[in-house]
Image (tube, rainbow, N blue to C red):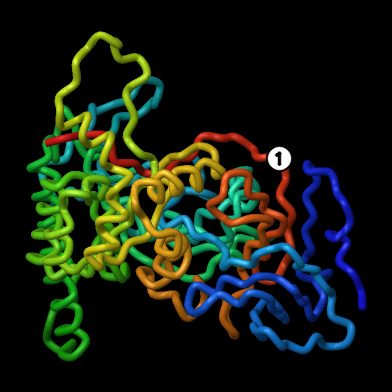
Amino acid sequence: MHRLLGLLILSPLASLTLSASDAPGWIAIRHARIVTVSGPVIPKGTVLLHQGLIEAVGENVAEPPGAWIVEGEGLTVYPGLVDSLSSWGMPSSSPATGRSSGSASSPGSGSPQPPPARGPEDRPSNASYLLAADLIQPGDRRLESARGAGFTSAVVFPSREIFAGQGALINLAGEKPGAMVVHSPVGQLITIRSGFSSAGFPASLMGVIAYIRQLYLDAAHYREAKEFYAKHPLGNRRPEYDRVLEGLLASPRALLPANTRREIDRMARLARELDLRAVLYGVQEGYRSADLLQAANLPVLVNLKWPERERDLDPEREEPYRVLEFRDQAPASPAVLAKAGVKFAFYSGGIERPSDILRAVKKAIDAGLDKDAALRALTLSAAEIYGVADRLGSVDKGKIANLVVTKGDLFQEGVEVKYVFIDGRKFEPARELSSPAQEPTQQETIE
């Protein structure tokens, strides 16, 4: 049996990867504790990998001749972790798109910009047609940092406009962008605060909501017109091609921002009115909104960047009770959602160091969330929400070989990530590279 070079004692700063051409046909992680998530924990078993997929999982799995062996005695194998709403691998700023709703010209541009938008027909702040899968940057240093914290996948989106674009679920390793894409598109990211403007349309929250409503109504009419023309082209004028509406129709779900109870109610009503397949994100006031979410029957993504007191705030300044309550109770939201049967997953929400994401999850556990539910929110629930549970999220035969192998419990203080497997390729954590994340966030607002 050949032994993996990774079994040698390496410097903690070293990073070992196996390229697709170098990876062995068979890899066996044996004698390890296996947390499948989809089923019972296997106290001591083997995970067999072959050609980037999980070939077998169990207590009595035979190791094929010539397989490379990873000795898992004293280690635990988990499904690879998933960040459910991220910008890892995305450019720091997406290309400017849509009609400007700002001034008529910008300093140093040399040419006048389009006039301020007058209404939804001008399609302001709209990049619904952008595909995250086309923007992936494999050289993004945050990918290595995320792998070192046990993350193997992320659902990534552009994040510049109200209609930000179509996301993709990607694996966090690959020499070419195309090799990293697991599924695309996964949904349309919609933001709110980025849409406010002092000139043009929309310039208020009411304007942004009206704009979102109108665009989806336009998309429904556009779809009907296209379907009618496809059946009856003779004697009828063809509908004009609209790339903004095409982008909305191509998105299998809409991600709507909703952090407070009022926002959750507002967006749940909008999703119901427009018959959207929606996912709410933010949801840090879930501790007082479980009834609304149960009634709406919508999955949610919980922002792990828990609210904190502003650093520059006058220490003598008194804060409203609602703000203090929000800061104190937000980490309890996942436990309340779990108890209410609301499907939820976690996202990093702008946490700069990926290793701090697990600390944020630990804060939710300390506030009452069961560890199994916490792990599910980082793995299988994320895959279910995005419709890829047949590929990711658990340690099961036939799924993509995305795994994290730890020494110690995943949520235990001082846990060590020993190995990460992505598409069956083995990685060892390198020094964490601190770089500001670019995820869309929900600000700490109490209405």
**Residue at 66% across / 58% down in the picture?**
406
Residue 437, image x, y percentages: 49, 39
Quarter of the image for the N terminus: give it.
Answer: bottom right
Q: Please, is residue 38 above or below residue 416 in the view? A: below
Residue 94 seen in render: no
Q: Which secondary structure lies at badge 1? A: loop
| Image quarter hosting the C terminus | top left
Residue 351 drawn at (x, y percent): 46, 39
**Other residues around mark 1 within 10 Å, as few (<14) / some (14–19) / many (≥20):** few
Residue corresponding to mark 1: 431
Residue 270 pos. (x, y %): 11, 59
Give how far across and how far down residue 364 sits, in percent.
Answer: 38, 48
| Foreground pick, 43 / 349 | 43
**44 is higher (above) or lower (below) than 179:** below
In the depicted structure, whether residue 356 falls above or below residue 156: above
Of residues 217 and 157, the one drawn nearer to the viewer in this rendering: 157
Image quarter of residue 292: bottom left
Q: Residue at x 77, y 89 (%)?
A: 62
Q: Quadrant of residue 371?
A: bottom left
Judge left or right: residue 277 versus residue 11.
Answer: left
State the residue at coordinates (70%, 71%): 32
Q: Label 1 amino acid? A: Arg
Q: Is residue 181 visible?
A: yes
| Picture residue at 47% right of the left edge, 71% below the top | 183
Q: Is residue 264 above or below residue 248?
A: above
Q: Is residue 279 left or right of residue 89?
A: left
Q: Is residue 352 left or right of residue 30?
A: left
